[in-house]
Amino acid sequence: MSDQHSNKPVGFAKGLTNYGDREFSVYLRRTFASSMGYSREMLDRPIVGIAHSASGFNNCHRHFPEMIEAVKRGVLAAGGLPIEFPTISLGETFLTPTSLKFRNLMSMDVEEMTRAQPMDSVVLLGGCDKTVPAQLMGAASANLPAVQLVAGPMSTSRHRGERLGACTDCRRFWARFRAAEIDAQEIDIVERRLASTAGTCAVMGTASTMAIIAETLGMMPANSAACPAVDADRLRIAEETGRVAFDLIAKPILPSEIITARSVENALRVLLAIGGSTNAMIHLTAIAGRVGVKVDLRRLNELSDTTPVLVNLKPTGDHYMEDLYAAGGVPAILREIKHLLHLDCRTVTGETLGERLRDVSWVDHTVVRPYAQPVRESGGLVALFGNLAPRGALLKRSAADPKLFEKEGRAVVFESLEDLAKRIDSDELDVSADDFLVLQNAGPTSESAMPEAGYLPIPAKLARAGVKDMVRMSDARMSGTAYGTIVLHITPDAASGGPLGLVRNGDRIRLSVANRSLQLLVPDEELERRRAALPARTQAPAKRGYAKLYEQEILQADEGCDFQFLK
Ligand code: FES
């Protein structure tokens, strides 16, 4: 039970429980492992851990038992012993106040359990929005050879001849219901048809974006991000992942050698080229932060100016993730922007990124456009700065209305999510389509822990009048499946004293995407007067447990909302 080259203990002989007698510890561990029915041959093999996030509270992961079996097949065939273990799971819609609050907790679970339990490499099996970032953050910190495996996207279904996929269509139908274009009976039918298979949301939402980022970083086998959850290829990918994880034991390539400044820049390029989720900026910043790489929003703007959007997927385009897989998957995207990428970056399979692209021979250009004929000339995301967002804010311009990009408007302010819920649909609300809706106190340091509430609904009376989009801004996040002219992640957030908290009804705000700016047109002296008059924070401090840890340690969006002590 030791590596023949280095003589280091492997498998069950690794990382022993401390009884003060090494041989006794090995003997005792083998005794208890034997109770699980392992033969001596299996007990002597190197171990590939399978950290998975299957849970009854996670619909996206409901096919994980089958995938775990396939990973095990790959590990066993290669000569290792596969051992699965559960970690925290974060089912996007099943957590309160928001799944983001628990991403760092899951990353700690992954980090500590891969380090504390005896394994020589690990497969990270996740998929739903926060699980893949949490696993990559944990793996980067543990720095044990690791391979990411994702759930794969859901397949689409049909409603009255139309294709449906969670969750861009969830929002589209809900907006139609709010505008009284469809009735309660129809929304009831749609509700049952939007998410009808295992897997992650079917569009270019956060889960799909993070899967593509994981593949681009090099943490996954080639062409493994976009394959549908229910496709037989998904199981073959799982089997291959098991084999790759085993191979990493003899020839280790550590997460810190894969996640580097150059591979992170590749990931940013791809994020822009796919018109990916704004959430990915927070997650990529946090993952990179774990290996000491800083993601700079001003660099994002430089890359955004020179990276076209090529992928024609909802919410910004027409197609679904299953179409991206059929079109050639992530390698097809990478091939189109090959000249913009650092091709020497290493991947978990030992190949460089460039080597992975050698055999890409066919791309369906209706889904992945050629570089010279993009969906949009410039990247999907842009960072904004100004006195309203000194440390930056984000706009997903590929999902926004360019007619609203250069605009000055009157602020209609909501002080909290509760205030928003209470007044947004009131006929008394003084609002017009030219106003800017401003939501405060929904950032990472607020009680609501930065929910995906940045997609402020169009006030009911304007929705009924046919208004589809207007400028909205907040310190909250937005689902990757949502769309609209929506400024997010305003940093620092209002609850920590950021200028967003100083905006008052009737103030003028100027948005200029061309100048990358977001300005509150109120004199500095007046802002100082308002700051001095701010009431003391009413939020009662958390008394104990994880909530207290979160409150003490949470960083702002520009630092990935990681915890200070985990960086
Ligand atoms: Fe899991 Fe959308 S709810 S990916």
Image (cartoon, rainbow, N blue to C red):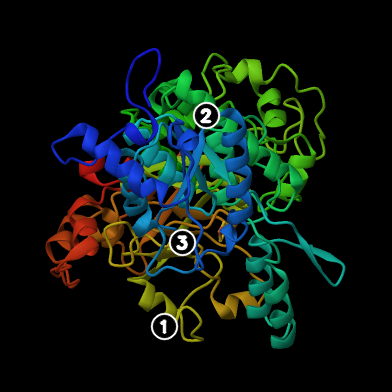
Q: Find residue 304 and report its image quarter.
A: top right
* Along the line of sight, the residue nearer the viewer: 38 or 289: 38
The response on whether ligand 1 sits within 8 Å of label 3 is: no
Q: Quadrant of the N terminus?
A: top left
Q: Name the residue furthest right.
A: 161
User: Circles 2 and 1: CB distance less than 8 Å?
Assistant: no
Front of the two marks 3 and 2: 2
Q: Which mark is residue 246?
A: 2
| Image coords of residue 29 (percent x, y) | 31, 43
Q: Is residue 298 above or below residue 29?
A: above
Q: Find residue 190 and report its image quarter.
A: bottom right
- How dense is the environment of label 3, judged by Cα within 10 Å: few (below 14), some, or many (20 and up)? many
Query: Could you tell whether 150 is left or right of 299 in the image?
Result: right
| Image coords of residue 366 (percent x, y) | 82, 39
Q: Which residue is mark 1?
A: 422
* Along the line of sight, the residue nearer the viewer: 275 or 378: 275
- How dense is the environment of label 2, judged by Cα within 10 Å: few (below 14), some, or many (20 and up)? many
Q: Which amino acid, by three-letter code, is at mark 2?
A: Phe
Q: Which mark is residue 452?
A: 3
Q: Is residue 81 above or below residue 323?
A: above
Mark 3 to mark 2 CA distance (whole Å): 38 Å
The response on whether ligand 1 sits within 8 Å of label 2 is: no
Under circle 3, the secondary element is: loop
Query: Could you tell whether 142 is left or right of 302 in the image?
Result: left
Q: Earlier in the sequence, mark 2 or mark 1?
A: 2
The picture quadrant for ligand 1 comes to: bottom right
Q: Which amino acid, by three-letter code, is at mark 1?
A: Lys
Q: Is residue 201 above or below residue 356?
A: below
What residue lies at 59% left-to-right and 17% top-to-bottom?
351
Q: Which amino acid, by three-letter code, is at mark 3?
A: Glu
Q: Earlier in the sequence, mark 3 or mark 2?
A: 2
Under circle 2, the secondary element is: helix
